[in-house]
Image (cartoon, rainbow, N blue to C red):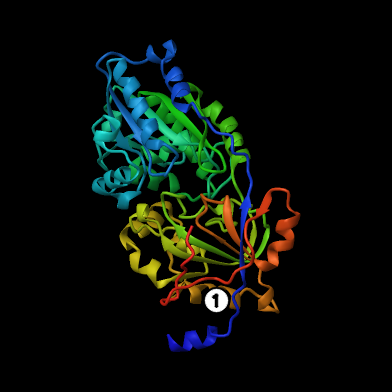
Amino acid sequence: MGVLEELLRDVPLPRMVRVRQRFDDSRLEDWERKLIRQLQQPDLRGRLSPGARVAVAVGSRGIDRIDEVTRVIVTELRKTGAAPFIVPAMGSHGGATAEGQRAVLAKLGIREETVGAPICSSMEVVRVDTLPNGLPVYADKAAAEADAIVVINRIKPHTAFRAKIESGLMKMISIGLGKQKGAEACHRLGFGQMAENIVDMGRILISRLPIVFGVALVENAYDQLCHVEVVLSDQIETREPTLLEMAKSRMPRLLFPDLDVLVIDRIGKNISGDGMDPNITGRYPTPYAQGGPRVNKMVVLDLTSETGGNANGVGTADFTTQRLVDQMDNIATYANGLTSTVVAPTKIPTTLPNDRLAVQAAVKTCNILDLHLVKLVRIRDTLHLGEIRISETLLPEAEQHPDVEVLSQPEPMQFDGEGNFTDGW
């Protein structure tokens, strides 16, 4: 590594300024009361019979209060005399194993003792039907054999395509409940047909399985619940587009649209299916989605503990660290690519020994004449965009932007003896 260190030794690093980006922070203070009131609607309760075994489908995302939401739903189901149980509905996540998916739920705080229901984790599926284009439609066997199914998911823009229905209840039904086989089938023809296949598969599963309702969650720009809605199964397809527009309007973003370098401290499946949300970074795994800032070079430094070594998404960055690569679980990471058919995000970028060299490499290659003028932004991850760090060169933009507050004076980047950042979040 002596040659690389010599090549990067004189690359300047900018002084950094802490700033706060301001977004709409309205949230549901009384979300539990509102959810319970909706769950107690007579027309909904009339769809559940005493003693009914109810599969509650929960995914792999780090959604605000997902463990509490699940607990409330389980409690209300029990009040009807039903016998709820939890089904991991996360396609191939968790390394496409029953144990791995149970572990993913545990990291989200969803355990039998915390939500009050047993967890039935299995990769066994049943084939429900076949689409006209030949794709098979699968469903989790335990859920398919239940008397009723409840689906929980956050509504948000997808990371790889654009449509009226993207990531939400229909996706949870068609891909999440389909386990590895269902996810693989839905992805088989690529993301160019994903929007159509999600809806077509979801429509079949709603008609053939005892899906009673879905619980749609929308978060604000600070990853806090701002909307919760119980949607009856026969209304999911027509209601979800409106909820998606609501979610899009609440999304955070980087308020600096043109960057030479974007540094992301950590990525993980609990943050986004792609490790980091392309809607934030502007780096998409497919040509079927676009938007976000224009970024010349991107660096990712580490993995979240919750991701369990799954580094899906790292391949959309230009540089990473040996620390991140050493934590990678290749099986869990590659299972994502093999299932989704999009393998670029599972590749390993140019890898440097530490944070400093990785950032210097990005600055050196960002294609500007004077490297002292680099426009650089550093974020914790794509879920936390309130407080970020910007290079001194971006101060004029920050001071003129009505939704940006400058919090500090310019300071040099701080590294430890190993060359890694010491100024955390």
Q: Nearer the viewer, residue 346 or 134?
A: 346
Helix, strand or loop for disc 1: helix
**Residue under the point 55% across and 71% down:** 413
Asked whether, in this view, residue 113 is left or right of residue 318, the answer is: left
Residue bearing mark 1 = 360
Q: Position of residue 400 (x, y in %)?
A: 76, 55
- Name above or below for residue 70 compared with residue 106: above
Q: Position of residue 272 (x, y in %)?
A: 47, 50
Quadrant for residue 48, please give it. Answer: top left
Q: Position of residue 349 (x, y in %)?
A: 47, 70
**Residue under the point 50% across and 40% down:** 167
Q: Residue furthest toward the front? A: 409
The amino acid type of the residue labelled 1 equals Gln
**Residue 209 in sight:** no
**Residue under the point 27% across and 13% down:** 50
**Residue under the point 42% across and 20% down:** 36
Asked whether, in this view, residue 43 is left or right of residue 10, the answer is: left
Q: Which image quarter is the N terminus in?
A: bottom left
Q: Position of residue 225 (x, y in %)?
A: 50, 35
Asked whether, in this view, residue 107 is left or right of residue 227, the answer is: left
